Each structure stands twice: as C-alpha cells, then as structure tokens.
C-alpha cells in the first residue's frame, strides 16, 4: 500500500527505489505480495490504477480506450482475472497483476512508465465470496462465456489496433486455460500478441533447464522431463523444450516430444486414457498404461527433471522428492506455482529431502537454506526474468508479430547470462540485482531475431543491439535545469 501510494505520488522516486533495491522490493510489488493484494484489492482500494473495460462498454470500447490519459502506448498487459497466479478467479481484483507486471516492465526492462497500460476486462466473476463482498469492485454477475465473451475480446483487440496501430505489444496474463490458448492462437496472426504464462514462463524454464544440465551432463535430448500440471505453463514449457531439442538435435518436433510427459489432475496423460484430452495436451499422449498418481508416474518414467505448475501447494511430497533423488544424482526440481502458498514444495523441503542434491527453482521467492552446514541459494524461475527484456526487444525493433523463434531467442539470451561464477555457487540464473543488464541482452537477442525474420519495422537495424537497447531504457533521473 505504501508503494502503491508512492507510485501515484512520485513515479520517478518509486522507480528509483525499485531499481536500486530490486531484490528486496520485487517480492512486494510482485509475487507473492501482489497475490495477497489482489485478494484484498476491494478493501485496500484507494485510487484507480489501470483501465477497466466491462461488458457494459460493448459497442464503445474504442471510446473507453481513448479516455486513457496517455496517448502513446507501447505495452498493454491485460487480464480477465479468471486465473490470478494459482489463486483462481479474483474477477476485477486481478488488476493488481497487470499493474505489477507493468511496474516490472519499467523497473526491470526500461519501458517508459507512460507507455505502459494495465487493463482488466470485466466479464463478471464466478467467485461467490467476491460476489457477496460489499467491497467488490467489479460487475456482480457470473462470468460471460461463449459468444458474448468472444465478441467483447474481439472488439477490444480491434480497438487496440485501431487506436495504437500494430506495434503495441498485448501481453495476455492470467487468463484461464480454456481461454488462454484460444486467444493466443486467434490473435497472434493479426496482432503483436504474447502470453506471458505460456511463452514467458516457457522461456525462463528452458533457460533454467539448459543451465541445470551443466550440473547433470548431456543435452536436452538425452533427458526425460515430467510435468505436473498440463495447463498454460506446463504445455508452454513442454512445447518450447521440444522446439529447442528439435533444433539442437535435428529431429522432428514429434520425435522431440517423446521424452516429455505430462501429468494432469487425472494422472499421466497417455493415449489409452478414456477421458477426453484437451487438444493442447494431446501432443503428449504417448503410449503407456494408465497411471493414476504423480509418484507412480515418476517411478515409471524416471525423469531427470520434475516441473510443477498445477497450482497445488505441497504436491511434491517427501516421497516424490525421494523418488526423484533415488533416480538422479542431481534431480532437477522446479516448483513453479505461485504464490508461495501454492508452491509444490519449499526450498528447504527440496534440499533436505534430497539430502542437498536437488537443483531447485521456484516461481515464488525463497530465502537461502542452510543444510548440513552448507548454504543453498534457490533459483527463482519466474517469467519476470523474461517478459521485461522480451517486451523491450519487441518495442525497440518495432516488431509487428511474435514468433516462437523470438521466444527461443529470449531463453537463449537469459541462459547465456549464467557464467561460471554463478555455476560455482550452484545457481542456474543470474541474480535479479543485474536484471537491467540481463534485460538489455534479452532485448538485443529478441530484436535481432525480429530483424532476421523481417518482422522489425524500425529501420535501419542498429549495429550494436545491446548498446542500443541500453540507450533506449528509461532511467528515473531528473533532468538538470539551466
Ligand atoms: O506472476 C508471476 O509471478 C508468474 C506468473 O505469471 C504466474 O504465476 O501467473
Ligand atoms: Mg501470470
């Protein structure tokens, strides 16, 4: 609440404070505190942040967009609040997420604050508690679905293009699975559309796996990956890992998918399963006997890495971590669900149950852990490493579309920032304290790919893209007066 006030009162000071104290303030402005802020958004509401577009605005969404005080927008983060982190449907109170993500776009990625626009689409909520809460700030109705939902989103996306042109990045955030994949597929051919939960998370995890394999040995193609959770994050990561394997090892993507297995709420996804498997999971329905639970799946599949993103806290039990540790000398354990209460296990559990052998990363931050007199520093495998730099790269190159190769370039840009100095400390990501440098490098990689693919509209292509990215970054300094 203090930081929200400061952001409102003295934006420059807010960003100066953020940039100078990233590691301390990230968990406040962002995950996990932002999750709690969304849960309590109605009762801590002071001034409106961001733009709300509701079902009641149908037919005049363009007019609503034009009411926003800033005219030159480069990045929009939009949610409909249906799947806020792992907390579920928070309706309009999800606004904290686009606001927090865009604060990071500026602090971590150097996109000008005035060029950032947080938006929440209000189509109602199915959260009964909120519907009965006198302080709820959104429409008091059940969520609109089907055609009514699709038409509002269509009107919104058309209005965005009409008002800001085709170089505005639209980042979809925390939509429910059943809309996230459909919206991305629908709008990526016509808009500069990016889904952070699918593509951003995929890039950060791929970078972490590439770094993690330095401790384990071998290439991605030599290993087996098991995902607990087959939603946006799980299948997004699986697809990017398969793409990277297919490029590294010159095999087809179908072949690359064979060492990747997914577990959802009904067990291991296999072709023999009787229930209907959603299209985005089908690619991973390999031939195997049905397996009901995670522990049995681990014993059968024998993965090198276990990647959790189901939003189910404490699902990596002692037995699960011990099974991973009996199969691997250095098991890779990623507990990606957010916020902390949804984390599959804590850092302390991962290190102690694996007797200090786990290579551990989590979506939400954990403090370093002392185990057997040794200090372990857990990695924060959060898309915050990717989206600010990714967005900066898109903005500075004037890219008009997002291609998977650009997401891959972002992952590689992050992975190459991990040096021997980090590996020696057991780290698979560089520290957030150097995030602006990391973002500039990711931006340069992404921009380079956009130019290579002929998708960049800002010509001529700058010669040194890293230097150029750095020179474009917003800094919270005061101009000197004459
Ligand atoms: O916001 C975060 O910390 C990461 C993320 O996108 C999510 O959990 O949905
Ligand atoms: Mg998200």
Image (cartoon, helix red, strand yellow):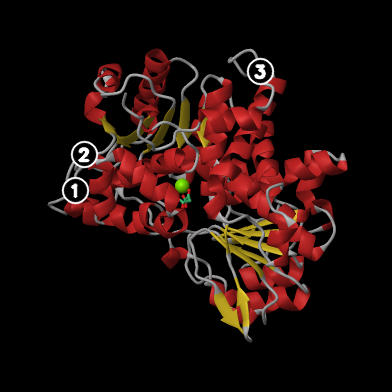
Q: Nearer the viewer, mark 2 or mark 3?
A: 3
Name the one closer to the observer, 292 or 344.
Answer: 344
Farthest residue toward the front? Answer: 482
Q: CA distance from mark 2 to mark 3?
A: 39 Å
**SS at badge 2:** loop
Query: Height in image: 352 above or below 21?
Result: below
Q: Position of residue 373 (x, y in %)?
A: 62, 85
- Residues 426 and 127: in front is 426
CA distance separating discs 3 and 1: 45 Å
From the viewer's perspective, tell me whether residue 415 is left or right of residue 157: right
Q: Nearer the viewer, mark 3 or mark 1?
A: 3
Q: Position of residue 185 (x, y in %)?
A: 56, 30
Q: Is residue 226 left or right of residue 105?
A: right
Q: In screen coordinates, is 412 left or right of 177?
A: right
Label for residue 461?
A: 3
Q: Quadrant of residue 405?
A: top right
Residue 351 visible in this rendered orientation of the protein: yes
Could you say whether the residue bearing mark 3 is in a helix, strand or loop?
Answer: loop
Q: Position of residue 208 (x, y in %)?
A: 67, 54
Q: How many marks?
A: 3
Q: Residue at x 30, y 52 (%)?
A: 38
Residue 344 badge: none
Residue at the right extreme of this rendering: 250
Disc 2 and disc 1 in contact, CB within 8 angstroms: yes
Residue 372, percent from left and from top: 63, 86
Q: Residue at label 1?
A: 45
Q: CA distance from mark 2 to mark 1?
A: 7 Å
Locate the C terminus by quadrant: top left
The numbered mark at residue 48 is 2
Q: Residue at x 36, y 52 (%)?
A: 29
**In contact (CB < 8 Å): disc 2 and disc 3:** no
Where on the picture, by quarter, is residue 336? bottom right
């Amino acid at each position: 609440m203090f930081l929200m006030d400061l952001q409102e009162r003295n934006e420059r000071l807010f960003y100066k404070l953020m940039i100078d104290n990233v590691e301390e303030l990230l968990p406040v402005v962002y995950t996990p505190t932002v999750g709690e802020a969304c849960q309590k958004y109605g009762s801590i509401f002071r001034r409106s942040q961001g733009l709300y577009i509701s079902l009641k605005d149908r037919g005049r969404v363009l007019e609503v967009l034009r009411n926003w005080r800033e005219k030159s927008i480069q990045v929009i983060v939009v949610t409909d609040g249906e799947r806020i982190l792992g907390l579920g449907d928070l309706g309009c109170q999800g606004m904290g997420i686009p606001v927090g993500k865009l604060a990071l776009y500026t602090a971590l990625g150097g996109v000008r604050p005035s060029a950032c626009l947080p938006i929440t689409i209000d189509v109602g909520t199915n959260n009964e508690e909120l519907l009965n809460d006198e302080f709820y700030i959104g429409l008091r109705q059940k969520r609109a679905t089907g055609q009514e939902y699709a038409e509002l989103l269509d009107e919104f996306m058309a209005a965005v293009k009409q008002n800001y042109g085709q170089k505005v990045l639209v980042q979809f955030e925390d939509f429910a699975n059943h809309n996230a994949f459909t919206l991305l597929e629908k709008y990526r051919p016509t808009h500069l559309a990016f889904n952070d939960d699918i593509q951003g998370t995929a890039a950060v995890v791929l970078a972490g796996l590439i770094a993690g394999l330095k401790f384990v040995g071998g290439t991605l193609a030599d290993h087996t990956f098991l995902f607990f959770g087959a939603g946006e994050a799980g299948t997004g990561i699986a697809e990017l890992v398969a793409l990277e394997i297919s490029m590294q090892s010159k095999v087809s993507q179908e072949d690359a998918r064979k060492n990747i297995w997914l577990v959802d709420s009904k067990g291991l996804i296999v072709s023999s399963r009787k229930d209907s498997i959603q299209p985005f999971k089908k690619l991973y329905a390999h031939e195997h006997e049905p397996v009901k639970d995670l522990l049995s799946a681990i014993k059968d599949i024998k993965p090198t890495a276990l990647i959790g993103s189901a939003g189910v806290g404490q699902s990596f039990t002692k037995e699960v971590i011990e099974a991973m540790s009996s199969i691997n000398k250095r098991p890779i354990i990623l507990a990606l669900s957010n916020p902390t209460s949804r984390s599959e296990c804590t850092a302390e559990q991962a290190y102690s149950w694996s007797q200090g052998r786990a290579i551990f990363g989590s979506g939400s931050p954990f403090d370093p852990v002392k185990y057997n007199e040794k200090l372990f520093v857990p990695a924060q495998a959060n898309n915050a490493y990717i989206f600010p730099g990714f967005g900066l790269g898109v903005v500075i190159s004037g890219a008009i579309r997002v291609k998977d190769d650009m997401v891959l370039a972002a992952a590689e840009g992050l992975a190459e920032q991990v040096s021997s100095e980090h590996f020696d400390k057991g780290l698979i990501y560089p520290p957030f304290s150097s995030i602006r440098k990391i973002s500039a490098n990711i931006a340069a990689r992404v921009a380079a790919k956009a130019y290579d693919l002929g998708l960049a509209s800002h010509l001529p292509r700058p010669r040194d893209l890293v230097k150029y990215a750095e020179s474009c970054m917003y800094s919270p300094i005061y101009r000197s007066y004459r």
